[in-house]
Image (cartoon, grey):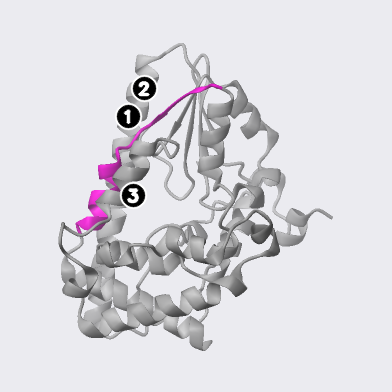
Amino acid sequence: MSVCTQLCLPLPRQSELNSFLWTIKRDPPSYFFGTIHVPYTRVWDFIPENSKKAFQQSHIVYFELDLTDPYTISALTSCQLLPQGENLQDVLPRDIYRRLKRHLEYVKLMMPSWMTPDQRGKGLYADYLFNAIAGNWERKRPVWVMLMVNSLTEVDIKSRGVPVLDLYLAQEAERLRKQTGAVEKVEEQCHPLNGLNFSQVIFALNQTLLQQESLRAGSFQIPYTTEDLIKHYNCGDLSSIIFNHDTSQVPNFINATLPAHERITAQEIDSYFRQELIYKRNERMGRRVKDLLEEYPDKSFFFAFGAENPPKAC
């Protein structure tokens, strides 16, 4: 019995499985492929041959962002920083700043025990990894610190050092000397996050810290983990419940235990992100895909976008 068979019992019928590959019918054909933001080694063996073949045969490969481009990485970094001369200590309420500092000290302390022998074998050190993820945190905007805290967990740390699926495909495309491109600009991914108002950001950071503090105390369990996401992806299950909780995305703050006024804030944040990071983004990406297909009618494209939000306007 395969791993996937064990994971997916009761086993779905073959016709119900989804390979996350959509064909755009034209001559030559082009493709949409839904990726997932986890180490590629956790999913690569489960990606069907038709998807790998479509990737190999396509002339041009497009991603959301070009993660192999140094400019993209530096623009993403600078977009996350507070205005010149400002520090997090100056902008956060004192209590939240103290709790944040305490939590990051805890993560730094725990990190050596979270790392795997395999990571150590590759020369990855806890201090280096902590600085790579959380270095310069006092200069970051609170919304990016919130996302950083959300990803600084034992499971996430154990997966560092292996390219995520999107990046692996980008590196493969480069190795195969394929033409590559991106349908988004850094600012389009970055500015919506910077667009939350201050009280919403403070609420989100506070909720994230509460969640992490409860996890440390053993009194809270994340409803959908990265493991759940990987299992469903490997079994070809496009369950919107799971994929809406993609751990690489913005955390969901809506829960029944919140007082009424806080639940309203959580719903406002959720609705804002849904609008900016899914609906508007899908429309924009869809328009650009359509333009590319019209501009290069004789080329076969392979569009690799996050499975939690493939563009719908095509």
Q: Which residue is at the front of the view, 93 or 207?
A: 93
What residue is shown with label 3? Answer: 278
Q: Which residue is mark 2?
A: 292
Instruction: Give neighbour class at mark 2: few <14, some 14-19, many 20+ (Cα, 10 Å).
Output: some
Residue 9 visible in the snapshot: no
| Earlier sequence position, callout 2 versus callout 3 | 3
Q: Is residue 189 left or right of residue 12?
A: left
In the image, what residue occupies the spot 34% across and 49% down?
278
Q: Earlier in the sequence, mark 1 or mark 3?
A: 3
Disc 1 to disc 3: CB gap under 8 Å: no
Q: Residues within 10 Å of mark 1 (few under 14, many from 20)?
A: some
Quadrant containing the C terminus in the rendered view: top left
Mark 1 highlights which residue?
288
Q: Position of residue 211 (x, y in %)?
A: 42, 79
Q: Is residue 310 left or right of residue 193?
A: right
Q: Is residue 178 left or right of residue 2?
A: left
Q: Is residue 62 visible?
A: yes
Per the rendered image, the range of residues in magenta is 177-195
Q: Establish if 106 lies above or below 39.
A: below
Amino acid type, callout 2: Leu
